[in-house]
Image: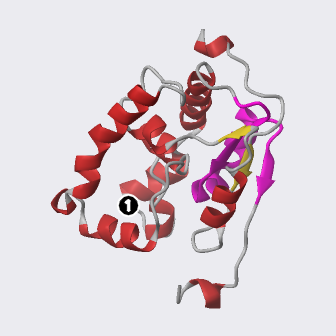
């Protein structure tokens, strides 16, 4: 049933800017449109199968209750996650990079080293075929679509899509892309 569930013909609308360029503000503003749907944090991180409707207030509260102890116990969060949490507010809607991570795609490698270092990680990064990541991403959206199909379009946001535009466009042939930009001399201090 999930694979036959059609996605909306418009979009998805995807915000692809790098960190600290206003993507979160723009994402939250666009998510106010009642005709679109942005994945909830709980859709992607707490008992994702089976998906539950947003109108299922009991199910949504149960998911939030499962999540609260993890977010409140700072001893369980690594130091880097604590620093990120301090500078990046948490919202009910969240970046779809959570879906990419579920598929095993963690493209922070791209930021951590260059391709010329000769390590196995570098080879994997260069040779890895990311089709499976966007196969999973599309299947995940179709799964969410079975319980809460947007009236108009999906709203997505992740800076990591810029590293795999070719795969993204294969799976979503009619996306609406927004690339935010900010001068580097303004980004680094913030």
**Residue in the image at 38% along x and 61% along y:** 119
Q: In this image, 6 relative to 85: left or right? A: right
Magenta residue check for 140: no
Q: Nearer the viewer, residue 155 or 167?
A: 155
**Residue in the image at 44% along x and 19% along y:** 50
Which type of secondary structure does the marked residue at label 1 adopt?
A: loop
Q: In this image, 69 relative to 189: left or right? A: left
Q: Is residue 179 above or below residue 21?
A: above
Q: Which residue is mark 1?
A: 119
Q: Quadrant of the N terminus?
A: top right
Q: Is residue 80 above or below residue 59?
A: below
List x then y, in percent, for residue 83: 34, 73
Q: Nearer the viewer, residue 66 or 8?
A: 66
List x then y, in percent, for residue 186: 63, 88
**Residue in the image at 49% along x and 68% along y:** 111
**Residue in the image at 48% along x and 24% along y:** 52
Q: Most extreme residue toward the left, as rendered?
A: 75
List x then y, in percent, for residue 133: 54, 37
How many labels sit on residues? 1
Q: Is residue 149 above or below residue 95?
A: above
Q: Is residue 59 above or below residue 69?
A: above
Magenta residue check for 165: yes
Mark 1, other Cα within 10 Å: few <14 / some 14–19 / many ≥20:
few
Residue 104 can be seen in this image? no
List x then y, in percent, for residue 62: 33, 32
Q: Nearer the viewer, residue 44 or 171?
A: 44
Residue extent of the magenta highlight: 150-178
Q: In this image, 22 relative to 175: left or right? A: left
Residue 169 can be seen in this image? yes
């Amino acid at each position: 049933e999930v694979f036959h569930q059609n996605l909306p013909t418009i979009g998805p609308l995807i915000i692809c800017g790098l960190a600290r360029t206003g993507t979160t503000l723009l994402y939250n503003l666009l998510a106010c449109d009642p005709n679109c749907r942005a994945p909830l944090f709980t859709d992607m991180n707490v008992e994702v199968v089976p998906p539950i409707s947003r109108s299922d207030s009991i199910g949504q509260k149960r998911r939030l209750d499962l999540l609260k102890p993890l977010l409140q116990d700072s001893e369980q969060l690594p130091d880097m996650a604590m620093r990120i949490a301090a500078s990046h507010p948490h919202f009910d809607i969240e970046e779809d990079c959570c879906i990419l991570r579920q598929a095993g795609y963690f493209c922070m490698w791209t930021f951590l080293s260059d391709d010329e270092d000769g390590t196995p990680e570098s080879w994997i990064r260069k040779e890895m075929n990311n089709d499976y990541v966007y196969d999973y991403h599309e299947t995940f959206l179709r799964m969410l679509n079975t319980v809460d199909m947007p009236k108009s379009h999906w709203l997505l946001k992740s800076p990591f899509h810029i590293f795999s535009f070719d795969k993204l466009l294969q799976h979503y042939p009619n996306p609406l892309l927004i690339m935010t930009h900010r001068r580097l001399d303004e980004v680094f201090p913030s």
